[in-house]
């Protein structure tokens, strides 16, 4: 557990939770589309690995209804405590949050939907987790994954600080054993894990205003100490000027150059394109419009 906590690049705890709330609001439409595509429905048993503050777990709970059940798993106890309090406040009894390192998690044939979002790109052994995720799917159930690809993120007009933030974040994830371009590899990884004929989609966001556009700033703050810990002198120079730091310039932040600019992607863990890989473990029943593969 300690090793996993040290490796994860983004600040956890309350700050991490608040950032994920913003992320959840901005990414929900794409995730909802994925759930509709894979057919999340009443009565299903679901698990959400690397659930963070549980926003997606709550949506799953709502979609499966009182006859269903959702489990959120994360290694960050602070986020999970907040999620549990949130569940109590919402009066949800069919949701559960478990503290675990996904690298040690194993729950064979237990779920109708096994899902994770923005997790695999941070792991050193994503293939092993994918295999255990597939093993956790009951016959007739589905595995669905959202993963990011940092190459999908860019700003227009180009902005040097934004580009530097991207470079540092990418280098940090890489250095900590993750994969900044995990998204494009999902299709092959599904096949390598023995998951047949996955259906893949690429989602490219464009955020021209509001909190979604500023998500990269929250992410940048959340990786600051990890970047400096890695000991990069350019990182130290740049972090002094990040928005929110005492030496950043309010005038620059209000610059009119910012109007009409946009950022692709969500500027956070999920930088840009998020290919969705989803496949259904077949019990022989076919669902219209979905790829179904009988498990041999
Ligand atoms: C980028 S966040 C995504 C959170 C959530 N899935 C979402 O989309 O809002 C990644 C989450 O994975 C968790 N995480 C990272 N490595 C983990 C591990 N080895 N075991 C359990 N959780 C892990 C982090 O604590 C964090 O909450």
Image: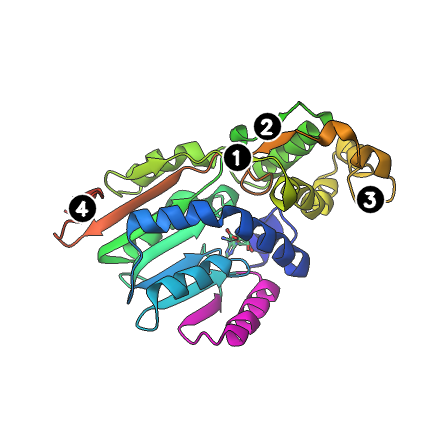
Determine contact: label 1, label 4, CB under 8 Å: no
Instruction: Find the distance from the CA under tag 1 to the CA under tag 3.
Output: 25 Å
Q: Is ligand 1 closer than 8 angstroms to the Cβ of mark 4?
A: no
Instruction: Find the distance from the CA under tag 2 to the CA under tag 3.
Output: 23 Å
Mark closest to the chain's N terminus, 4 or 3: 3
Q: Is residue 200 visible?
A: yes
Q: Is ligand 1 closer than 8 angstroms to the Cβ of mark 2?
A: no
Decide: few, some or many residues near mark 2? Use Cα within 10 Å; few <14, some 14-19, many ≥20: many
Determine contact: label 2, label 1, CB under 8 Å: yes
- Dot 1: what SS? loop
> What residue is rendered at 32% in x and 44% in y?
278
Q: Which mark is residue 154?
A: 2
Specify whether 41 is left or right of 88. Answer: left
Instruction: Find the distance from the CA under tag 1 to the CA under tag 4.
Output: 30 Å
Q: Residue furthest top?
A: 158
Choose between 213 and 176: the one closer to the eye: 213
> What residue is rendered at 64% in x and 57% in y?
18
Residue annotated with mark 4:
288
| In this rendering, the label closer to the viewer, 4 or 3 | 4
Instruction: Find the distance from the CA under tag 2 to the CA under tag 1.
Output: 8 Å
Which stretch is magenta?
75-98
Quarter holding the N terminus is bottom right
Q: Which mark is residue 272?
A: 1
Instruction: Find the distance from the CA under tag 4 to the CA under tag 2.
Output: 37 Å
Instruction: Give the percent coordinates (x, y) of residue 85.
Output: 56, 73
> What residue is rendered at 50% in x and 61% in y?
54
Instruction: Give the percent coordinates (x, y) of residue 48.
Output: 42, 58
Mark closest to the chain's N terminus, 2 or 3: 2
Q: Taking 285 as reference, is 196 above or below it? A: above
Decide: few, some or many residues near mark 4? Use Cα within 10 Å; few <14, some 14-19, many ≥20: few
């Amino acid at each position: 557990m300690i090793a996993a906590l040290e490796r994860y690049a983004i600040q956890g705890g309350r700050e991490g939770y608040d950032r994920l709330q913003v992320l959840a609001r901005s990414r929900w439409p794409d995730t909802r589309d994925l759930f509709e595509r894979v057919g999340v429905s009443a009565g299903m048993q679901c698990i959400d690995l690397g659930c963070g503050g549980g926003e997606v777990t709550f949506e799953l709970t709502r979609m499966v209804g009182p006859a269903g059940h959702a489990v959120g798993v994360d290694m960050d106890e602070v986020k999970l405590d907040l999620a549990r309090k949130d569940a109590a406040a919402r009066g949800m009894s069919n949701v559960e949050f478990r503290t675990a390192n996904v690298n040690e998690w194993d729950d064979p044939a237990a779920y109708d939907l096994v899902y994770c979002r923005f997790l695999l790109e941070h792991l050193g052994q994503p293939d092993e987790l994918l295999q255990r995720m597939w093993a956790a799917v009951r016959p007739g159930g589905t595995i669905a994954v959202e993963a990011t690809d940092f190459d999908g993120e860019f700003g227009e007009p180009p902005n040097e600080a934004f580009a530097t933030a991207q470079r540092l974040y990418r280098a940090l994830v890489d250095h900590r054993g993750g994969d900044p371009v995990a998204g494009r590899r999902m299709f092959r990884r599904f096949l390598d894990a023995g998951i047949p004929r996955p259906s893949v989609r690429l989602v490219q966001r464009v955020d021209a205003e509001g909190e979604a556009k500023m998500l990269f700033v929250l992410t940048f703050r959340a990786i600051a100490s990890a970047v400096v810990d890695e000991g990069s002198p350019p990182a130290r120079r740049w972090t002094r000027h990040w928005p929110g730091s005492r030496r950043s310039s309010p005038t620059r932040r209000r610059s009119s150059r910012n109007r009409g600019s946009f950022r692709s992607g969500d500027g956070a863990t999920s930088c840009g394109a998020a290919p969705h890989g989803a496949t259904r473990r077949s019990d022989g029943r076919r669902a219209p419009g979905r790829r179904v593969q009988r498990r041999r």
